[in-house]
């Protein structure tokens, strides 16, 4: 398309001020790029995705965030529980292969996202709230971004709209993952009792409770609060489903005794990938690029990793005037694919063999722990290699099954 009238005021417009958007905006602004971040919601605002992985250490090392103990709660690892069978398996991040820091954090997302937003402003990004991006038009020499407050024009556009996945919907490029979580119901409880706090201490590990059609989370937060949610792999999830389980669970009955419950919320449209997550003058970061069933808390860490990965070649391309190249993000896509594929394979195969059946010690145990820690871009993890090979086999098997089913339908119709 040919260019249209209007001055190009911004180098980059980022839609969304969550972790993916700010992880992109912060290094760009520090490099002198003119960055406009448009956020639909006012901050602070409630959001799930409260359990981080050790790979999120880039918050400190790359983004310059100083963890506030009123927001960041130390997290030692994760514990998986099946109440029906009594099985438990705990993973301490200190047992991972050498790599990132040996711990993570549980965070209050309302304040966590605000800290990241403020950091983006401090380094020079222009962040505006209450502005929703409605449509994006990538032209030959610019990007026109239509919002509820008029048009903005930039040289490049970054979609960080999360599960709203603005560009995937606009381009029709969203592909759902089969057999993954489809929706979640969640709430917060305040006034966590002494016994419950002692049960989580000293590691403050997230609890992942396995149920037949999905899983539940219990995430301790600062100020004696607990985040609780249920993810279902079945369609037609009702808010009452969370209540039904909490009322019959010995674990949650014990943890929630004497607490006060907050509002219950629900979100859907889980587990998808954007098959056109980069192109001429645009890219996607965070959940708008790929959202995998969040059982392993991978979302925020992958969003930060992709945001940082996008910022480096984009800053260089803006300097060289080559930002319109549709292949600009090819190396980013290839690098991130290893992380996405690893977590996708882990979700497919995790329960019996990979988690509850994990060895108690040795390099394979360390490899499992490293994947759970979000250290998924390395090339020396034997367990990760096995996992990725099993994924490729599953894809080939699924493709062959689809071909056989198609051939059978053809014979039946002839």
Image (spheres, rainbow, N blue to C red):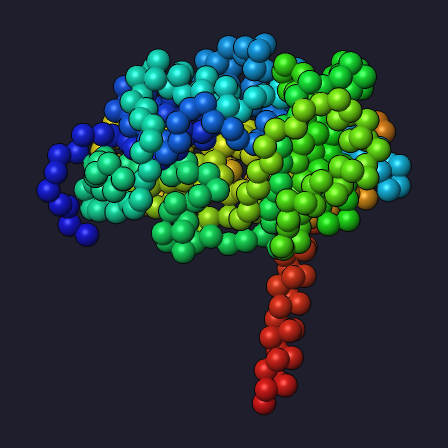
Q: Residue 234: x, y in percent?
A: 66, 53
* As drawn, 320 above or below 199: below
Q: In this view, does 93 lie to the left or right of 343?
A: right
The x and y percentages for residue 287 are: 49, 39
| Residue 314 makes an appearance in the image | no
Quarter of image, res 242: top right
* Residue 235, visible in the rendered structure: yes
Name of the residue lying farthest toward the left: 5
The residue drawn where x is 46% and y is 13% is 64
Left/right of residue 141 with respect to residue 68 in the rendered view:
left
The one nearer the camera, 64 or 245, is: 245
Q: Quadrant of the C terminus?
A: bottom right
**Residue occupying image coordinates x 63% and y 86%:** 412
Relative height, residue 335 to residue 62 (above, below): below
Q: Nearer the viewer, residue 58 or 120?
A: 120
What residue occupies the far bottom of the structure in this picture?
414
Residue 266: image x %, image y %? 57, 41
Question: Residue at image x 70%, y 29%?
Answer: 218
Q: Is residue 116 above or below residue 233?
A: above
- For the point 36% across and 52% down, the residue is 170
Determine which quarter of the picture holds residue 11.
top left
Residue 164 image point, x, y percent = 44, 43
Q: Tell how many labels.
A: 0
């Amino acid at each position: 398309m040919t260019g249209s009238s209007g001055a190009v005021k911004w180098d980059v417009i980022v839609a969304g001020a969550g972790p993916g958007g700010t992880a992109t905006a912060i290094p760009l602004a520090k490099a002198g790029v003119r960055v406009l971040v448009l956020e639909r919601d006012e901050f602070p605002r409630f959001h799930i995705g409260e359990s981080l992985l050790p790979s999120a250490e880039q918050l400190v090392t790359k983004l310059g965030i100083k963890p506030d103990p009123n927001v960041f709660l130390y997290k030692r690892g994760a514990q998986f529980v099946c109440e029906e069978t009594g099985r438990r398996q705990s993973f301490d991040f200190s047992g991972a292969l050498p790599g990132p820091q040996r711990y993570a954090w549980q965070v209050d997302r309302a304040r966590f996202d605000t800290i990241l937003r403020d950091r983006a402003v401090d380094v020079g990004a222009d962040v505006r709230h209450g502005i929703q991006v409605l449509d994006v038009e990538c032209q030959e020499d610019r990007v026109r971004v239509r919002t509820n407050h008029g048009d903005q024009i930039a040289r490049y556009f970054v979609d960080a709209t999360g599960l709203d996945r603005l560009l995937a919907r606009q381009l029709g490029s969203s592909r759902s993952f089969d057999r993954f979580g489809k929706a979640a119901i969640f709430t917060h409880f305040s006034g966590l009792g002494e016994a419950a706090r002692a049960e989580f201490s000293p590691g403050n590990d997230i609890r992942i409770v396995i149920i037949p059609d999905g899983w539940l989370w219990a995430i301790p937060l600062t100020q004696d609060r607990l985040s609780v949610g249920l993810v279902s792999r079945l369609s037609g999830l009702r808010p009452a489903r969370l209540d039904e389980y909490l009322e019959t669970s010995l674990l949650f009955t014990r943890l929630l005794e004497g607490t006060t419950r907050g509002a219950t919320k629900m979100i859907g449209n889980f587990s998808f990938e954007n098959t056109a997550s980069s192109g001429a003058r645009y890219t996607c970061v965070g959940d708008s690029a790929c959202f995998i069933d969040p059982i392993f808390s991978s979302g925020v860490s992958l969003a930060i990793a992709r945001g940082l990965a996008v910022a480096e070649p984009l800053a260089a391309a803006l300097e060289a005037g080559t930002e319109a190249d549709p292949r600009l993000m090819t190396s980013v896509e290839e690098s991130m694919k290893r992380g996405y594929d690893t977590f996708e394979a882990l979700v497919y195969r995790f329960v019996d063999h990979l988690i509850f059946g994990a060895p108690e010690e040795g390099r394979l145990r360390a490899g499992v722990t490293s994947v759970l820690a979000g250290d998924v871009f390395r090339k020396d993890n034997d367990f990760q290699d096995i996992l990725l090979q099993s994924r490729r086999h599953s894809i080939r098997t699924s493709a062959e099954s689809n071909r056989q089913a198609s051939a059978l339908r053809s014979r039946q119709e002839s």
